[in-house]
Amino acid sequence: MIINKSIELSDLQRVSFLALVEDFERLSFALNEKGLRHTSFLGDFQPFHSPVARDRAWPERALWKYWEMCMAITFSGVSSRSVVLGIGESSTLLSFYLASKGATVYTIDLNPALAANANHVASVMKWKLFNLLSDAADLPFPAGTFDHVLSICVLEHIERQERAVLEMARVLKRGGVLGLTFDYGYLEPGCQGFMSPDEVETRIVRPSGLEVIGNRHFSESLWQEEGWHGAWGALFLCKPGILPKPIDVTWVDKADYALIQQDLWQRLERFQREDVPLLQQITQLKQELKQKTELVKALRNGRVMRVMIATQEFCRRVQGTTV
C-alpha cells in the first residue's frame, strides 16, 4: 500500500477518512459552542473565509488539510493509549482531537499565544494535553519518551531541518512512529519545501536513521506527474525495534455511517467546480455509495468506537487497493 506520497484527494473517498472528517467537524463545533478556539487551516486564529485570509486561502486547501490529518492519524497507528508529541501543533484541531480521544499529548511551538490558548482549552476540557514553548531542533524531552511524533506542514518552516529530524527520532521509543506532512512540489517564500522524491530521501529519511513504513520510496501523485505544482506530501517512519501493527481501523464516534457520508458529500460539493475532474468523480461515487448499506462495522473499545471497512471488494473498486 502506498502511504508515503504527495497528496491524492481520492484518499478522502475512504470510509474511515470520511468518518474522521465528521469527527473533526463535530469537535470543532463543540469547541466553538464553549467559546474555545483552535487554529484554522491557515495555521492561526484567522477564520478561513475572512477577507483578511482571502489571499492566503483557496477552496481546495481545506480538503488538503483534512487529507493531512487523516493520513497522520490512520497510518501512524496512534490510539487512546498513545503518548504523542506534536511538533508545531499547539492549538491545532489535530492535537485537540487526539487529546479528546484519551491520548496523552504534548505539543511544542514557538508562538506563546498558541501554547497559552492550547493550555487553556486543555484545562477547560480536562484533557491530558500539555503545550510547551520550544524549538523543534532542541526538544526538552528525554530520549525514548513518545510512541508517536506527528507534525503537519511544519517541517518546511524549520530553519535547522536536519537537526529537527534527528531530535524527533531521538525522542521516539523503540518501535515508535514519526508521521510528517510537508510542502511538496512548490517553494513558498521563506520555506524549505521538498521538490522531489530524492529530496525527501536525502533531507528526511537518511538523516533520521529511521525505517520507512510502507512503500520504501516516496511516490509522486498524478498531480505532479501532470505538471501540477503546489501540493503536500506525507511520510511515515519507524524507530527500529518493535514493528507497528498493521493499520486497519480508525476512531469514530458515530454509528450511522450513512449520515456521515451524506454530510461530508454536501461539504465536498461546496468546492465542486467544472474544472476539477476529481470532485466530479466524487459526486459520481456518491450515487454509488447510496446503494451500499453495509460498508462498515462498529466496534466498541471502552470510550472509543472504531470503524472498519467491511468489504475488500469495496476497497478494490473505490480506492484501487486494499486496506
Image (cartoon, rainbow, N blue to C red):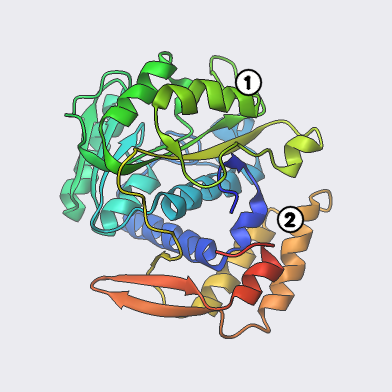
Quarter of the image where one finds residue 13: bottom right
- Residue at (68% x, 38% y) in the render: 220
- Label 2: few (<14), some (14–19) or many (≥20) C-alpha neighbours in 10 Å: some
Image location (x, y in percent) of residue 305: 34, 72
300, 110: nearer the viewer: 300
246, 185: nearer the viewer: 246
Image location (x, y in percent) of residue 246: 43, 59
Image location (x, y in percent) of residue 230: 68, 31
Secondary structure of residue under mark 2: loop
User: Can residue 154 be seen at all in this image of the molecule?
Assistant: yes
Check the image and report above or below for 268 versus 118.
below
Q: What mark, if any, has residue 187 been given in the picture? A: 1
- Residue at (31% x, 44% y) in the render: 175
Split into 4 quadrants, where in the image is the C terminus? bottom right
Split into 4 quadrants, where in the image is the N terminus? bottom right
Secondary structure of residue under mark 1: loop
